Image (cartoon, rainbow, N blue to C red):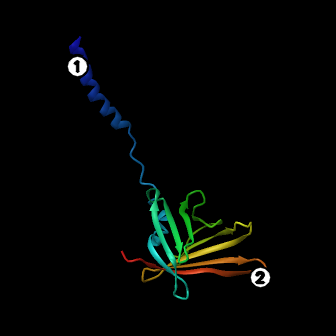
Amino acid sequence: MKNCMIVFGLMMAVAIPAFAQEDTPAPPPPACQSDEYRAFDFWLGAWDVYSTDHSLAGSNSITAEENGCMLLEKWTSAQGATGQSYNFYDPGMQKFRQIWVSAGAVIDYAGGLNDDGQMVLEGSINYHNGQTAPFRGTWTLQENGMVLQYFQQYDSENDQWNDWFTGLYERQAE
């Protein structure tokens, strides 16, 4: 009886790996690696942000999170105000999306790269007092590696888009 157990144990050790190997599917490709997920990677990094008058507006840190499926933005203005955003390709919408939260205001917009390579997102800004307005943002990678960020809010009373914020992102020294 003791010999039968040893033989049986050896047979199982040989049979299981061969069976498991045939039925094991190939691992899926890494998530979020296709071009649409990488469209905003030019914004990754630690940045000093300057306003149009060349004064320091604040600093911004953009990191890849969730295995590269999301960019996390952490903003601090020169006056100490903060804000954060989640930036990700939404496969259901087939658009890049950003949700920004700062001091009770929320910006939720979506879009993608235009023909000029600019990331353009459109949606709405919702203020803590209940006011809401159409909103859009454009990020443009400059030849020198800086990023130009340009925000506009729609004024329905005057039927025009007004500048909301313009910032020039310069990489911080490492």
| Numbered label attached to residue 158 | 2
**Dividing the image into 4 quarters, which one contains the C terminus?**
bottom left
Could you classify mark 2 by the number of other residues whose Cα lies within 10 Å: few (under 14), some (14-19), or many (20 or more)? few
Question: In this view of the protein, can residue 1 be seen by the observer?
Answer: yes
Residue furthest to the right in view is 157
**Which numbered disc covers residue 6?**
1
Name the residue rendered at 22%, 13% in the picture: 2
Residue drawn where x is 45% and y is 55% of the image: 31
Q: Quadrant of residue 63?
A: bottom left
| Disc 1 secondary structure class | helix
Residue 18 sits above or below residue 141 on the image: above
**Residue 110 in the image: x percent, y percent?**
60, 66
Q: Nearer the viewer, residue 29 or 147?
A: 147
The residue under the point 24% across, 15% down is 4
Of marks 2 and 1, the one in the foreground: 2
The number of discs equals: 2
